[in-house]
Amino acid sequence: MRIIQLWSLVFFMLAAAGYLIGSRRLFSLIGILLGASAPLLVIIFHVETFPVVLSLAITGLLLYGISRSRFDSDAIEKRLSLEEKALRDTRNTYQAEHARLKIIDEDAKAKELSIFNLYEFTKKLSHSLKFEEIFSEFVSFLGDRFSFTRSELIILKYENRDLRVDRVYELWGSRGTAEKTPKQPHGERGKSLIDCEELVKVLPDGSEELFMARDEDKTLFKRLRFSDEVETFVAVPLKSEKRIVALLIVENLSKSEVDDFTILSAQFALELKKVLLYETVESLAITDGLTMLYSRRYFLERLEEELRRSVRQRLSFSFLMADIDYFKQCNDTYGHLVGDVALKEIARLIKSTVREIDLVSRYGGEEFSILLPETGKEGAMRVAERLRRRIEHSIIKAYDESLKLTISIGISCFPSDAKDSNTLIDKADTALYEAKRSGRDRVCPYAP
């Protein structure tokens, strides 16, 4: 009996070792040894068969129970581990998807904000027909939205199919140098800092924009007269009826911003086209088509404004009425085509002789009216005499003809000669008649 107990104890110890080690092969080996050793007990030690069989059954059942407990626990632990890993993988997948959806949502919100800002920008532009107003809105939007050093808006015009610079507006950006005020237009200039005509030549046909970096083509930067600080530039042609009416040039703009900048420029081009058309119509309404001086109607409106301003601020101003001498004889001798050229040249000479603040109009026929703000009679006499001498000493080329023409000028002053516009014009006309009667080619102030 002790042998059976010892035999069972050995196998229990082996089972315990197998449980700790957790090897299925070891448990199988223990089971084989248990089954093989039972007959040996009966044969060698002459142990009764029934106790051996009973002990074998009990020990086998216990071994089976221990092995199932051990390996079922391992299976459950392994399954739980796999499920935990699957849950972890699922959680990571959901987190990655959430992050991706968050990025998409942020991009959508950014695009929505961008579209809204562009809509607001467009709405503000559409409310104005004045270039200065839409340019101010454009400057504000451009400065807030993009990072650059300097920008130029170059308004172009065509003269006999030749492209010329009409106006230039300059803007310093957020990356401008400290001594230059950022986000503020430097106003209108007559000349661009770069070679616009050359830039138009290098623009690809039908292109929406041109982006260039200095390291790509240094010679192009030199040809276009860009400064050494400019590393990149983008040039956007603003077109109307397939003709370039303006160039928008931005220096040191990053390539990633070019697409957004092009969209903004396209919208600005639409508004600019509308404004330029309005300016053209307005110009036709207030200017004389032949001489390009102010029309009589517009001049009289401005004369009334100056009269009210001078009354309010107690200022004086002078009114000049000029007439080309013997102009009818010129037309009869050389024809009206030559006469038209002569009128245009006289108008140019008058406009280039007076100040920027002075107003010059074609009053009618060969007569011109000139308003000299804040100018007394003595100053008006000097201006009129300078104007008379300049025309007297000029040779006017008209087709194959070279003409020598003179003018007579009458002067009246506010408030010494008259206190209303009609009387002021009448007094200047009286003085002009006196200049004609006295021999022409002279200046006469009004004398009571």
Image: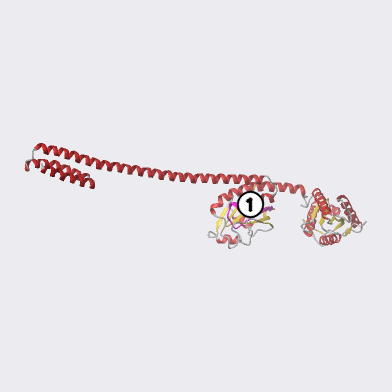
Is residue 93 toward the left or the right of residue 171 in the image? left
Residue at (60% x, 56% y) in the render: 174
Quarter of the figure with the C terminus: bottom right
In the image, is residue 106 part of the stretch drawn in magenta? no
Front one among 223 and 370: 370
Locate residue 438 relative to residue 363 in the image: left or right: right
Relative height, residue 322 to residue 19 (above, below) = below
Q: Position of residue 302 (x, y in %)?
A: 80, 51
Q: Residues within 10 Å of mark 1 (few under 14, many from 20)?
A: some
Q: Amino acid at mark 1?
A: Ser
**Given the current orientation, which residue lies at the most extreme right position?**
448
Count every numbered label the image shows and give the total: 1
**Residue 347, percent across and down?**
79, 55
Residue at left 22%, top 44%? 24
In magenta, the rendered stretch is 137-158
Could you tell me which secondary element the residue under label 1 belongs to? helix
Quarter of the image for residue 164 reads bottom right
Question: Magenta stretch containing residue 147, yes or no?
Answer: yes
Q: Position of residue 47 (x, y in %)?
A: 8, 40
Visual colour scheme:
secondary structure
Horizontally, residue 404 falls left or right of residue 447, namely left
Whole-percent x, y for residue 427 in the image:
89, 53
Q: Which residue is mark 1?
A: 140
Vertical order, 205 against 179 (above or below): above
Question: Looking at the rendering, in which quadrant would you find the N terminus?
Answer: top left
Of residues 446 and 366, the one nearer the viewer is 446
